[in-house]
Image (tube, rainbow, N blue to C red):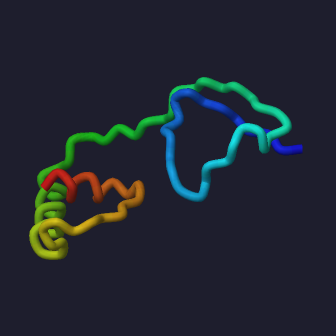
Amino acid sequence: MRTAQVNEYAPRTFGDGIIHVSQFDALVKADIPLPELSFSKPSKTEEIIGKLLADNLIEDGATLQLGLFYGHTHMLRS
């Protein structure tokens, strides 16, 4: 049995992951807001580290792939 959870809050994505609704035997509607991360204001040290990373390791116009590590947000703010 193929079951899918449908959530109106989930973003629509494209690519090979699109599966037509007819491919499922059952649909479960669960309109639950997605969790959001909140970040505290960076300390002065974190701001300095973020600026050093942004200014010295990343070329202008580069594409970044980031995880959930808190330091990434401080670097992006710089």
Question: Residue at point 66% right, 32% down?
Answer: 6
Q: Position of residue 41 (x, y in %)?
A: 21, 41
Q: Quadrant of the C terminus?
A: bottom left
Residue drawn at point x = 21 percent, y = 59 percent: 75
Quadrant of res 70: bottom left
Nearest the viewer among 60 and 56 is 60
Left or right: 68 in relation to 15: left
Quadrant in which the N terminus is drawn? top right
The residue lying furthest to the right in this view is: 1
Answer with the quarter of the image where residue 49 lies. bottom left
| Residue 69 on image: x %, y % | 38, 58
- At horizontal 78% and vertical 44% (from top left) the residue drawn is 23
> In the image, is 19 to the left or to the right of 9?
right
Q: Is residue 10 above or below residue 57?
A: above
Q: Position of residue 64 (x, y in %)?
A: 30, 65
Position above or below: 29 against 41: above
